[in-house]
Image (tube, grey):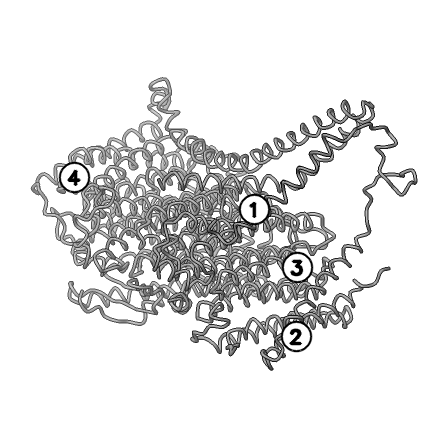
């Protein structure tokens, strides 16, 4: 009762048990009458074709990764913008350096054709 | 000793051969092709000759000084400096190293000249001389170094050159193997040597005087008295380690095995490196550190015992060998044993004296055998020789003189030096009549096998085939001249160290400032005379036996070889199977360890991978069964799940990464458990 | 928020060079790529000049989480040199293997930046950042020869195991933070002094996990399994870079963290570390004996040398630190040289890495043969070469610290190592057949790199005094 974070622990525990409990209840109470049609993966009503796990072109991952990187780096601008006045010239220069590095990366990705789909 | 005289020419004694080596090593191949071999020879021999002249200058420089002031030094620069440790690159010449540089440059020079003739036809003439010069440099560095570390450089350097020259004719794999063996066996000795250096430095450091310079060690050695480590006196342990180093370089039990194989190298190399100079480095090192060895009676006992045991063992092996150079190789080991016997009874002067005389007659013997091999077109088996005295008169006479010397015939050099050792073994406070008796037995065998060789090679009927007989020829002057000089030395070199009953021992007096006064003899002159007569008698018996068997053919050698069912003969002929035993125990042992290591790296890991893969497969198989029976029961599913299992199996096995991670994790857990255990 | 940026100058210069190389690479033709080599080298030289200019200063930046002392500068110069040699020896290699040149050099430079950060970091978090910057660069470098499947496999392995080890390291840092309340080395040390918290299980466990992470990076047994596979699979210049610079960076971090400020924490672990050193030397040497590929042999030999270097860490103190720094210098020279000769043997698709490929090299390429003999002898600890003086100081530091057993086992090990180093020399001078080896005209940069290594190997052996002084001054600047 002494630790300030004790309630958080309780919350975690509570949340976990609710999820577990719901799943268990559904498992125990729900009727199970499986048949082959029912076991098939649901594909908007069409009869399923092939394996549900198919390969994606690696390009998707590339784009996702680039997005993540530049997105996260963009996020750094927000705290800087908030404290812009307090950080002054020093902050401006630092952000300039940071952005230069990001831009170099961007130019690199662009020129290498990482942004072209075909 | 207090104020060594600074000079600036000692460095050139050492460096000139290095310049020669560098010159021939870098430009020799081109010079040989474009200009001719004579230029290579010139650049190889001239530095050694100049070194010899400078050594003579140093010698006479010393001679002009009062005995207690005989000490020259030449400090080049500070090499290492760390905390209390300061090591200079500095050379010194005192009476002891003066003897050594004269031997090395003198005999080395003769052998260089001899090689001009011997190696004349070789394609890699320049390479040979580059290494020979490099060797001379390293050997001179070894004997003129003013501290243990610099000496160690020379020590390793001579080993390296010896290795390169043993394997000189690398086209034959036997030679390569012999070179490797020599190198690795020597490294075992070097390991002892460096540990000895560390121990000396460390224990002196404990007393506040960490140093590796000889003069300072000598000054502070007394501080080490009574210091102990692991319950053994520090001095005893350090000297034992150093002696291990000496047994490697000087081919003593248990590390002598490389020397006979080293005979695969060109014969002048055998003469210079494996008889006259390098193999005596161990003896020199003990004489140099005589003050330390004298402080450790246990070590001295070990040295003397190993010395006399090696002398005997090698002599018994030499009795039955048939290769002309192998007999000489075992004879060298045996003679080195005598030197260690002398050192072991604290008669360092006698050891150095024998070192010097041995250098003359053994170099002469080897070069003589080289001349024989040259004439025989490469044949080394004595059973195929005989009667060569007619066609090789110069070689024959010089060889005979050297045989007389090594057998200890009165008035030759070998007689005086060997007698000095035997007398010291008997009369020194560290000696005993046992050591003397064993030494005399060895001397008898020496006389036997050397005369056996002389008779087999030069007397009787020639047993070579006609083709060889037709081509028999005396070697050119450039080869016989060094033989003559060495033969003269084999007789005259002994007269500077006459035994007490004949006159003043100039040699002992010369070394006195370094090695201390020779022991006052216990016995009288009469005792010395009696012992001398006895040992000469034993040697004469050895000669007579050889004469009967191999000259008169009055006795068949089979009489002796069949003794004890031929067992003794086989043991001797096969060198007591020591090589085979070493091969089995050490080489196989190390390889086995290496293989076990590889096995652990591969199979244990594989085992873990396999294990984890099987577990995964099993789990998925059970899963599959479960799926089938509970959910569907369609037989097809079985195939699917097996496929899935295989898939999982494959995933686990690609790359072995999991196994690495398991091992790391395992190691961490084990370490934590161990840590926790010894914590509480 | 005044911050002194001077300490960052050399590393900033390296990053700037890396970015310029990366950018320029995009805009030049394929036959102009030689320019990138020069830009990289000039950038490294400039950074080296800056480090030299800053020599003797003792400043901190970012709340002292980066320290610019002689120790950091010593390692900065070492890493810059290592990067320069790596670039020199890879010029021909990357062209033959179709590795993208621009990225290759840029990654070498960026890894170098990470290493510099590791040596200068006075804060565990910053140390970790440096380590990751270095590691990620090297992961990619390992796999850059994409046409070769072993390279991809090696990169994957290296990456996965590296990530695993990083986990240990991070967890260790977290535990130490939990126990001492800071990740800043100075503040951890003072916390130790105040609360006497050393001896607490949490701190001890943290230190242990940190050791595990570092032991992985220096490739100590039993954290070595990745080394042979990775060194073998990686492009040879990268193997050399890993063997020298990555190892040196990990040792630099280890020395800064545990030889001075947190030394009381290490003393508790002396016995296990001793076992680690002995195990590393012995296993490395034993396994090296039974290799048939020289590249794998060098990989195991680098493990064995990590074992020798661990001796210095166990010995600690001024003599241990000095020996460590000096040995790293010597080790760098001879290892770069040995790998350099290996690179020179590569002929098109065929790597020529087996012992038998060295047959007769001494006669076909006298310079390469002579150089390789020197490196092998030096690695085996033969006087008067760098390896001998280096080992001499290592063993001496062990003896001075009272670990005579370590010195003896070390000496025995260097005896053992002769067997496999000698085999290379035997091959080169006493066998025939084998690879041709590139002539000077076809690989001048590589020959330059080998020549530098030869000079270093001989110089550090014959005239070690200046480098020893440098090592001592650098190490005591930690205090």
Q: Nearer the viewer, mark 3 or mark 1?
A: 1
Secondary structure under the numbered disc 1 in the rendered image: helix
State yes or no: discs 4 and 2 in contact (Cβ < 8 Å).
no
* Residue B306, horizontal then vertical, whole percent: 27, 38
Q: Examine the rendering and report whether any part of residue B507 can be seen.
A: yes
Q: For the residues marked 1 and 2, what is the alpha-carbon distance in whole angstroms?
A: 38 Å
Seen from the viewer's position, the closer of residues B500 and C344 is: C344
Q: Return the chain for callout 3.
A: C
Circle 3 Cα neighbour tier, 10 Å, few/some/many (<14 / 14–19 / ≥20) = many
Q: Specify the subunit that label 2 lies on.
A: A
List x then y, in percent, for residue C469: 38, 68
* Residue pictured at 50% horizontal, 59% vertical: C248
What is the CA distance from the residue labelled 4 to the residue labelled 1?
A: 91 Å
Q: Residues within 10 Å of mark 1 (few under 14, many from 20)?
A: few
Numbered tag placed on residue A81 in the rendering: 2
Q: Where C128 sits versus B177, above or below?
A: below
Res. C438 mark: 3
Same-subunit check for callouts 1 and 2: yes
Q: Which percent across, then down, holds residue B393?
A: 39, 45
Which residue is the site of mark 1? A10
Marks 3 and 1 on same chain: no
**Callout in the foreground (4, 2):** 2
In the image: residue B106, left or right of residue A82: left
Q: Answer yes or no: is residue B89 visible.
A: no
Q: Which mark is residue B431?
A: 4
Residue A111 screen position, x and y as percent: 78, 68
């Amino acid at each position: 009762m002494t630790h300030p974070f004790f309630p958080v622990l309780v919350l975690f525990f509570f949340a976990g048990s609710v999820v577990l409990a719901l799943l268990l209840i559904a498992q125990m109470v729900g009727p199970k009458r499986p048949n082959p049609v029912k076991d098939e993966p649901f594909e908007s009503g069409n009869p399923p074709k092939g394996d549900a796990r198919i390969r994606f072109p690696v390009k998707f991952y590339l784009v996702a990764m680039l997005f993540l990187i530049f997105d996260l780096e963009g996020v750094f601008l927000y705290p800087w913008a908030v404290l812009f006045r307090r950080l002054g010239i020093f902050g401006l220069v630092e952000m300039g350096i940071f952005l230069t590095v990001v831009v170099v990366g961007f130019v690199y990705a662009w020129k290498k054709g990482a942004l072209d789909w075909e | 000793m207090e104020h060594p005289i600074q000079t600036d020419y000692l460095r050139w004694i050492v460096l000139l051969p290095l310049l020669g080596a560098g010159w021939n090593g870098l430009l020799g191949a081109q010079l040989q092709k474009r200009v001719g071999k004579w230029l290579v020879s010139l650049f190889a021999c001239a530095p050694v000759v100049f070194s010899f002249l400078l050594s003579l200058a140093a010698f006479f420089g010393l001679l002009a000084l009062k005995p207690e002031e005989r000490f020259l030094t030449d400090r080049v620069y500070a090499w290492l400096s760390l905390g209390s440790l300061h090591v200079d690159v500095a050379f010194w010449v005192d009476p002891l190293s003066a003897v050594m540089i004269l031997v090395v440059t003198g005999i080395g020079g003769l052998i260089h000249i001899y090689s001009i003739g011997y190696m004349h036809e070789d394609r890699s003439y320049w390479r040979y001389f580059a290494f020979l010069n490099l060797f001379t440099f390293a050997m001179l560095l070894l004997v003129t170094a003013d501290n243990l570390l610099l000496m160690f450089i020379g020590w390793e350097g001579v080993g390296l050159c010896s290795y390169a020259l043993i394997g000189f004719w690398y086209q034959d794999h036997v030679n390569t193997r012999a070179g490797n063996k020599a190198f690795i066996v020597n490294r075992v000795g070097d390991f002892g040597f460096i540990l000895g250096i560390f121990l000396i430095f460390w224990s002196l450091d404990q007393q506040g005087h960490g140093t590796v310079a000889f003069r300072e060690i000598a000054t502070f050695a007394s501080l080490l008295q009574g210091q102990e480590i692991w319950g053994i006196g520090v001095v005893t342990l350090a000297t034992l380690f150093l002696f291990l180093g000496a047994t490697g370089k000087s081919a003593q039990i248990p590390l002598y095995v490389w020397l006979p194989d080293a005979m695969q190298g060109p014969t002048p190399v055998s003469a210079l490196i494996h008889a006259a100079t390098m193999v005596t480095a161990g003896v020199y090192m003990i004489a140099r550190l005589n003050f330390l060895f004298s402080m450790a009676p246990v070590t001295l006992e070990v040295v003397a015992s190993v010395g006399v045991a090696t002398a005997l063992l090698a002599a018994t092996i030499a009795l039955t060998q048939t290769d002309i150079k192998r007999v000489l190789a075992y004879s060298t080991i045996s003679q080195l044993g005598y030197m260690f016997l002398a050192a072991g009874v604290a008669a360092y002067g006698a050891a150095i004296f024998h070192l010097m005389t041995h250098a003359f007659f053994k170099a002469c013997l080897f070069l003589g055998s080289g001349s024989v091999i040259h004439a025989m077109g490469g044949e080394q088996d004595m059973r195929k020789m005989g009667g060569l005295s007619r066609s090789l008169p110069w070689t024959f006479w010089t060889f005979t003189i050297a045989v007389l010397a090594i057998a200890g015939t009165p008035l030759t050099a070998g007689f005086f030096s060997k007698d000095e050792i035997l007398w010291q073994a008997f009369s020194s406070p560290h000696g005993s009549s046992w050591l003397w008796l064993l030494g005399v037995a060895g001397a008898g065998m020496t006389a036997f096998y050397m005369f056996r060789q002389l008779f087999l090679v030069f007397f009787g009927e020639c047993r070579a085939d006609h083709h060889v007989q037709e081509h028999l020829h005396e070697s050119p002057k450039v080869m016989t001249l060094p033989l003559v000089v060495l033969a003269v030395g084999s007789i005259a070199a002994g007269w500077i160290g006459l035994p007490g009953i004949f006159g003043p021992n100039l040699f002992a007096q010369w070394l006195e400032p370094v090695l201390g006064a020779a022991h006052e003899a216990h016995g009288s002159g009469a005792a010395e005379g009696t012992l001398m007569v006895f040992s000469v008698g034993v040697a004469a018996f050895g000669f007579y036996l050889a004469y009967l068997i191999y000259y008169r053919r009055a006795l068949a050698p089979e009489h002796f070889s069949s003794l004890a069912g031929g067992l003794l003969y086989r043991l001797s002929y096969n060198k007591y199977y020591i090589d085979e035993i070493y091969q089995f125990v050490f080489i196989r042992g190390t390889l086995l360890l290496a293989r076990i290591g590889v096995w652990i790296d591969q199979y244990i890991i594989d085992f873990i991978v396999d294990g984890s893969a099987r577990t995964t497969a099993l789990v998925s198989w059970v899963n599959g069964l479960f799926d089938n029976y509970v959910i569907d029961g369609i037989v097809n599913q079985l195939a699917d799940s097996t496929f899935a299992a295989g898939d999982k199996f494959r995933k686990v096995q690609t790359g072995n990464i999991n196994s690495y991670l398991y091992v790391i994790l395992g190691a961490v857990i084990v370490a934590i458990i161990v840590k926790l255990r010894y914590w509480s | 928020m005044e911050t002194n940026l001077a300490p960052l100058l050399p590393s900033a210069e390296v990053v700037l060079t890396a970015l310029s190389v990366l950018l320029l690479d995009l805009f030049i033709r394929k036959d102009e790529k030689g320019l990138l080599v020069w830009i990289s080298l000039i950038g490294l030289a400039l950074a080296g000049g800056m480090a030299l200019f800053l020599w003797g200063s003792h400043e901190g930046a970012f709340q002292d989480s980066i320290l610019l002392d002689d120790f950091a500068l010593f390692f900065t110069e070492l890493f810059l040199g290592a990067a320069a040699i790596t670039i020199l020896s890879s010029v021909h290699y990357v062209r033959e293997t179709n590795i993208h040149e621009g990225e290759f050099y840029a990654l070498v430079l960026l890894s170098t930046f990470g290493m510099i950060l590791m040596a200068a970091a006075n804060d565990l978090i910053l140390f970790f950042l440096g380590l990751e910057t270095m590691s990620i660069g090297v992961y990619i470098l390992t796999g850059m020869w994409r046409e070769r499947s072993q390279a991809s496999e090696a990169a994957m392995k290296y990456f996965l195991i590296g990530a695993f080890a990083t986990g240990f390291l991070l967890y260790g840092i977290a535990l130490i933070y939990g126990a001492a309340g800071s990740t800043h080395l100075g503040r951890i040390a003072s916390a130790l002094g105040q609360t006497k918290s050393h001896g607490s299980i949490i701190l001890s466990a943290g230190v242990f996990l940190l050791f595990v992470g570092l032991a992985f990076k220096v490739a100590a047994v039993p954290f070595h399994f990745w080394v042979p596979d990775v060194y073998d699979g990686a492009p040879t210049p990268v193997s050399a870079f890993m063997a020298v610079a990555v190892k040196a960076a990990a040792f630099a971090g280890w020395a800064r963290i545990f030889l001075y400020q947190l030394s009381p924490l290490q003393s508790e672990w002396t016995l296990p570390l001793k076992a680690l050193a002995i195990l590393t030397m012995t296993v490395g040497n034993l396994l090296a004996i039974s290799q048939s590929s020289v590249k794998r042999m060098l990989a195991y030999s680098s493990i064995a040398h990590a074992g020798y270097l661990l001796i210095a860490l166990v010995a600690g103190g001024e003599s241990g630190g000095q020996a460590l720094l000096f040995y790293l210098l010597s080790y760098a020279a001879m290892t770069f040289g040995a790998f350099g000769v290996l690179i020179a043997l590569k002929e098109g698709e065929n790597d020529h890495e087996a012992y038998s490929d060295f047959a007769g090299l001494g006669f076909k390429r006298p310079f390469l043969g002579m150089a390789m003999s020197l490196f092998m002898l030096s690695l085996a600890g033969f006087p008067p070469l760098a390896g001998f003086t280096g080992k001499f100081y290592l063993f001496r530091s062990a003896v001075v610290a009272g670990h005579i057993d370590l010195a003896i086992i070390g000496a025995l090990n260097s005896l053992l190592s002769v067997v496999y180093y000698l085999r290379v020399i035997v091959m080169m001078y006493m066998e025939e057949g084998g690879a041709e080896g590139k002539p000077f005209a076809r690989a001048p940069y590589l020959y330059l790199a080998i020549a530098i290594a030869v000079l270093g190997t001989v110089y550090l052996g014959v005239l070690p005094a200046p480098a020893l002084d440098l090592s001592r001054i650098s190490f005591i600047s930690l205090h």
